Image: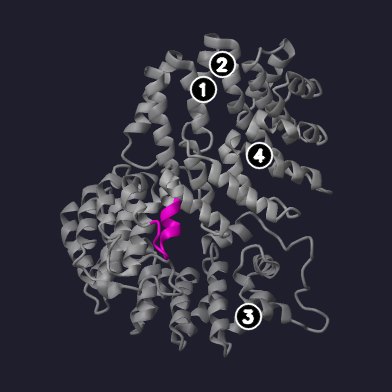
Amino acid sequence: MNEDHVYDVSEGRLAPGKVKGPDLVSPLGDWGWLEAGIVSGDVLVPGSDVRSHIFYWVRADRDGLMTRRLLTFTTDRRVSARRTIFELLDQLSFQNPGWLLVADTAESALNDVDPQVRRTAATLLVGTADAERAMSALNASTDPVVRIAFVDAMPWNQVTRHQAILETLRSDPVAAVRLLANVAVFTRDDPAAWPALDAAIRADLEPCAGVLNAPGSRLSRTAGERWARALTSLDREQDCYAWTQRLANRVERPQVKLEGVRMALAAMREWRAAPDRVTPILTGLLQDDIFEVRSAALHAVAASLTASRLAADELASMLDDPELGAVTATALGSGGDHRAVPHLVRLMLSGSAEPRLAEAFRAVARKGADPQAPVAAARQILAALPDSCAPGLPMRVLAAFGPGAAAAVPELVARLEGAENDTPDSTIYVLGRIGPAAAAAAALLRQYPTQGATLALLKVTSDRAVAERYLAGRPEQLGRDGIASALLTWLTQHGGLTTRQHKQLRSLFRVPGSGQLNSAGAIWLHEGPAVAAELLEVLPGYLSDDLYGPKALQVFTAMGSHAGPVLDRLDRFIASRHRAGPSLGSEDAEMRADETLLAATIAARQKITG
């Protein structure tokens, strides 16, 4: 809900200028565009024109004609339309407290025949009315669906005597209400109460299966995920491991084992030691009799690079699984295991949409996998699609293997020769990654006056004149430049810089961001220990970034003992029990970013001190 709203409203998104949008009321009174958007579901698609128009007009006048027109669909005879409109209203209500016109409609819908509509209406009422009115509606309702939604959405810290109310709800006849109340009363100030709360939640865990994450719920979290969140928020690491072990026991019912898997995943997302503790539990479920349990355990292992490496042998035994083989191969490959390569190749040739396939190819390439089969497969796809835009995955695979992809140069040259009214940036990038073995493309690269082609040409020809000619055409004070830092770094490594080029390098280093970081290595190479203090002042600020952190670590590694003052900072990062990944919009991606950065930090520290 919030992500959609942020997309459309928080950044001040207006009605799309490219279309101007339909008039709020056309001369003929035609609202067909709005009904079409509701029926199709486009009103829930971030960025769609119809959604943007709605958000624009509601933001301009939240009780105006647009809102009133939307409310007419809340009693539409079509269940799908009512579900869509209430979900839309819930998204529109974000940062719109006290929206009484909508609150009245939401309260009227608490008796709708459809459970999903009632669930969303209860959530909407909490978001648009004051807490006292929402509590009155909760107390008046005997519908379990509505009561669960109210308890889930209620801002308890705004409710008078909320502690006493929650204590009463802990003995509610509805299991999900009891569980939500027990989760809500967890507090860091009363650890003595934790065992009893845990026991009560465990008793209600199975009856809550599929209830708290039912369609129309405020959150998509299951009962176990909510419990896990309570444990992680209180930093109850050992308790989380213990409950994972108990819930994931093979004698438990499938619904309970699934919650154990979810708790294991929550633990890995929170604590760095968790993969070592829970991976053996998860691998024990990879051969479970129930497919859903096997699949959930596999996806949990696959989410973590550390867990995937720990479970490598178990994963390798599942590569030929007809239903889970694709996830297994990408998990094993993402850990750099060469056993995954033939299966990754087959996935690429079959057009698989497995989301981490390119990541797996990059990992096995970094670990020195034989490039022959992946490169041959990429060439086969390119040859079959000579006139298309560069297929994304094959190009990423060729780039991953770099010089090992030299056999693909003829296909890449053909793509350059056949490019019309287009700049084949991905082809140029891959040629640069291949390097000198792509010399046959040099003449064609010279025909493209782009930064990417200049950088690729330098890597292919190793001709200083390529870099010097480009830099000579740029001002002495560069500010920001897409390739200047790479060119200057290459020149520093291959004969050094002129006085003017050094000034250009210094101008890049003065501007915080990618230019500063990417020029730091060349600054060290050119100026040596004299610049150590300056680098030690600037570069630590990049260490926590998943993209920039490894590059900063590379500079510190090159500095060797001169980077000694940063060791305390590295040690603190390494010693942290908790994940420190950046905000990437995906908890699993953030976990993997932390795992990658932690490994790079440990390796850098060893080199600095070694």
Circle on res. 371: none
Residue 55 in the figure: left or right of residue 247: right
Residue type, label 1: Val
Q: Earlier in the sequence, mark 1 or mark 2?
A: 2
Examine the image and state in which quarter residue 197 appears: bottom left
In this rendering, the label closer to the viewer, 1 or 4: 4
Q: Position of residue 222 (x, y in %)?
A: 35, 66
* Coloration mode: one colour
Residue type, label 3: Val
Q: Earlier in the sequence, mark 1 or mark 3?
A: 3
Q: Nearer the viewer, residue 303 or 259?
A: 303
For mark 1, what is the residue? 555
Q: In which quadrant will I find the C terminus?
A: top left
The Cα–Cα distance between marks 3 and 2, rounded to whole angstroms, is: 61 Å
The Cα–Cα distance between marks 1 and 2, rounded to whole angstroms, is: 8 Å
The Cα–Cα distance between marks 1 and 3, rounded to whole angstroms, is: 56 Å
Q: Is residue 510 above or below residue 26?
A: above
Q: Residue at x 28, y 56 (%)?
A: 282
The Cα–Cα distance between marks 2 and 4, rounded to whole angstroms, is: 28 Å
Residue 530 in the figure: left or right of residue 63: left
Q: Earlier in the sequence, mark 2 or mark 4?
A: 4
Please say whether residue 451 is visible from this viewpoint. no
Circle on res. 430: 4
Residue type, label 4: Val
In this rendering, the label closer to the viewer, 3 or 2: 2
Q: Earlier in the sequence, mark 3 or mark 2?
A: 3
Circle on res. 524: 2
Are the residues flagged by discs 3 and 2 in contact, CB closer than 8 Å?
no
Look at the image and say whether residue 162 sits in the magenta stretch. Answer: no
